[in-house]
Image (spheres, grey):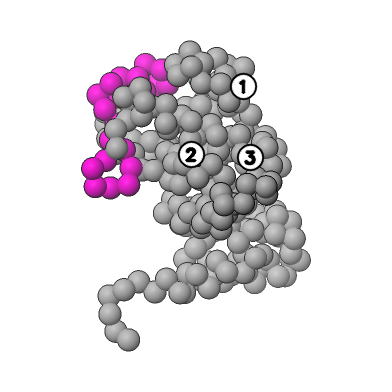
Amino acid sequence: MNDDLPDISRLASLLADPGRSRMLLALLDGRMLPASDLAEAAGLSAQAASNHLARLLDGGVLRVEPRGRYRYYMLMDSSMAHAIEALAAAAHGGDLQRPRLRPKGNAELRLARTCYRHLAGRLGTALCAAMEEEGYLKPHTTAHGFIITETGIGWLREALDIDCNAPGSRSPLMARACLDWSERRDHLAGPLGEALCTAFLTHALVARRSGNRSLEVTDAGGEFLRQHFALTL
């Protein structure tokens, strides 16, 4: 059939394999990882991982960069990360109707983690909701996201050194919303989400943990959230 509809079945077939999906979830924090790390994350042999990675590269899901002796893999772009996060949310959507089931993910991941360079988990969703409540964000009337208000522009600059009006700034006045798979609420994605995550790391409000994409909210981060939003995670 010849039409202008995108062929989502091709992408869906690439994401359907459990091994490939585990490798993609391991890349959701925006890092570049070698094949050996991805094989370990997916519980696959080196040969099997190599075959899966080749298919994901051919399908445009991943890209690769040679660095010295090694090749490092990453998600193709933020829209691919957004699609994977949305699928993770949909995969666990039935949990809301089954309250006796344990929440998905460990406690550290549910509290705070990176989702392709933005803040996710309870930290990310609470920050998004608090910024809207304070008037720093307002819902966009047509797109699924938020508009950064003038008050919000001022707060971002004063509190986190994020200048939305700087020449060449990648933080436009439109902020995208991303459905969080563990919280089933929105966290901030896109350039603003990336800028917030970078600022939280730069100001040591959060710190990366080794072994997964969870984040530790530092003492300084806890004080920041209490002072600006009366938030306690």
Q: Give the secondary structure at mark 1.
A: loop
In magenta, the rendered stretch is 140-162
Q: Which is nearer the N-term, disc 2 or disc 3?
A: 3
Q: Nearer the viewer, residue 121 or 69?
A: 121
Q: Give the secondary structure at mark 2.
A: strand
Q: Amino acid at mark 1?
A: Thr
Tell me residue 156's x, y (percent): 36, 23
Q: Is residue 127 above or below residue 83?
A: above
Q: Give the secondary structure at mark 3.
A: helix
Which residue is under mark 3? 109
Tell me residue 16's x, y (percent): 57, 69
Q: Nearer the viewer, mark 2 or mark 3?
A: 3
- Residue under the point 45% across and 39% down: 187
Q: Quadrant of residue 213?
A: top right
Q: Residues within 10 Å of mark 3 (few under 14, many from 20)?
A: some
Q: CA distance from mark 2 to mark 3?
A: 13 Å
Tell me residue 87's x, y (percent): 51, 58
Q: Which is nearer the N-term, disc 1 or disc 2?
A: 2
Confirm whether residue 20 shows in the render. Answer: yes
Which residue is under mark 1? 218
Contact (Cβ within 8 Å) of mark 1 with mark 3 = no
Q: Amino acid at mark 2?
A: His
Q: Is residue 220 above or below residue 176?
A: above
- Residue under the point 31% across and 24% down: 135
- Residue under the point 43% across and 45% down: 178
Which residue is under mark 2? 118
